[in-house]
Every structure is written in C-alpha cells, then in structure tokens.
Image: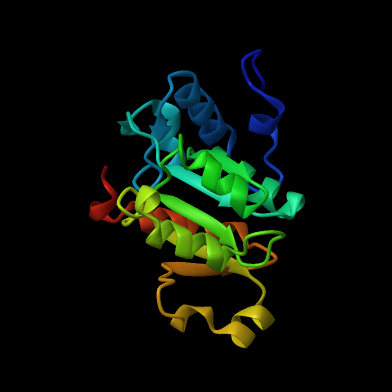
Amino acid sequence: MLDSNQSASDASASSVIQSPADNEAQIDARDQGVALDRDSATAEEAASGDVPLTAARHRVLVVESDVETADLMVTALENAGYEVEVATDGQYALMLLDSFEPQLILLALAMPGLSGLEVTQILRGEPRFAQRFRATRIFYLTDKEHMLEKRFSSLPGTPMTDYLFTPIDVSELLDKARRVFADPSLRH
C-alpha cells in the first residue's frame, strides 16, 4: 500500500521482488532517513522493527547512457536502501562528483563523450579527484564481447574492482554491491 510520501519510483518494484513486510519496513526506514542493513536482516526482522539501522547510507553513482539500464539499476539499488545518483555521460558524472561522494561507481565503458576508461583515468589521476576517490570501488558495465575485445582489466592506470555484464542481472548487481559494502575499509 502506498502512502502520500512515496514516489512512483519507490513503488516501482518490477526489477526487485519484495515481500509486503519487507517493502513496508523499507518504506518506514526511508521515512526515517536511514537505510536497512540488508546483509543481516530477514523480512521477518524488517517487519518486526528488529532490523539494525545505519545513519549513513551507502552511496552509489550510476554512470550509464542507456536510460532503461540506468533506470533498472537505480530502482533496484534504491529499493535495497542505497542512496543513488545517476549520470548519463562521463562529463556529467565528473560534475556530480564535486558534490556527491559515492563509495561505489557503476560505470559504463561505452558512452558518448568520455568513455568509462577515460573517466576512471581522470578519477585516479587528477589531483582534485585522486585523493577523495582512491578507495572508491568501480564496477565497469559492459557486454561480454567488449570485455573480451578490450581486456580492460589489464590496462595500466585503470584499476577496477569488478564488472557487470549487460543486460544487467539485478540479483548479481545487488549481491556484488552487498559484498562491496561489507568491506570494512569502506567505512567513511
């Protein structure tokens, strides 16, 4: 059931199936401005209010020029309790990074303008970004053919944390994001 404070994107769960109790607990947590700790919570714990809450939400930047793919990822991540910003090109992503400090960046390799590799090289090399984002995890978004053709993981100066193949598998996306945020070195 929707309340008057819930937006259409909050209600859209076509890519993530949630139990009614889980969804209600998520809405309650959003209204309080906190995220549920999904790594340790069951739907029953969420419904009972016994879920540990964290004051600092995990932040994710989605950089993808394909609007459908970006919307799918944003919806899934927001429904899982992550704070998400989206950019449709590399240049806009760099502008967003002046005010938004994600712990995870989902970065398409092929985009108009700056490619994902060029964005990564700027993030890791330019002084205004290098220090602030040195611990930020980067997942490249690519199709299998591009991955095999470019073998981007071995390019010097472009470290990656992981990759996701397109079309995006929402379960894989959420599983990999959970593992990233379980890493104690990301607590900042």
Judge by depth and name the residue closer to the eye, 32 or 98.
98
Q: How many marks?
A: 0
With respect to residue 148, does 48 lie above or below?
Answer: above
Who's the residue at 49% across and 54% down the image?
105
The single residue placed furthest to the top in the displayed view is 4
- Which image quarter is the C terminus in? top left
Residue 98 in the image: x percent, y percent? 46, 38
Quadrant housing residue 37: top left
Residue 141 in the image: x percent, y percent? 60, 65
Q: Is residue 155 left or right of residue 39?
A: right
- Is any atom of residue 176 visible in this view? no
With respect to residue 51, does 69 lie above or below?
Answer: below
Who's the residue at 39% across and 61% down the image?
124
Who's the residue at 46% across and 69% down the image?
162
Residue 4 in the image: x percent, y percent? 66, 13
- Is any atom of residue 58 visible in this view? yes
The single residue placed furthest to the bottom in the displayed view is 149
Residue 83 in the image: x percent, y percent? 49, 37
Judge by depth and name the residue closer to the eye, 180 or 23.
180
Q: Is residue 152 left or right of residue 161?
A: right
- Which image quarter is the N terminus in? top right
Quadrant housing residue 5: top right
With respect to residue 80, does 121 lie above or below?
Answer: below
Color style of the picture: rainbow
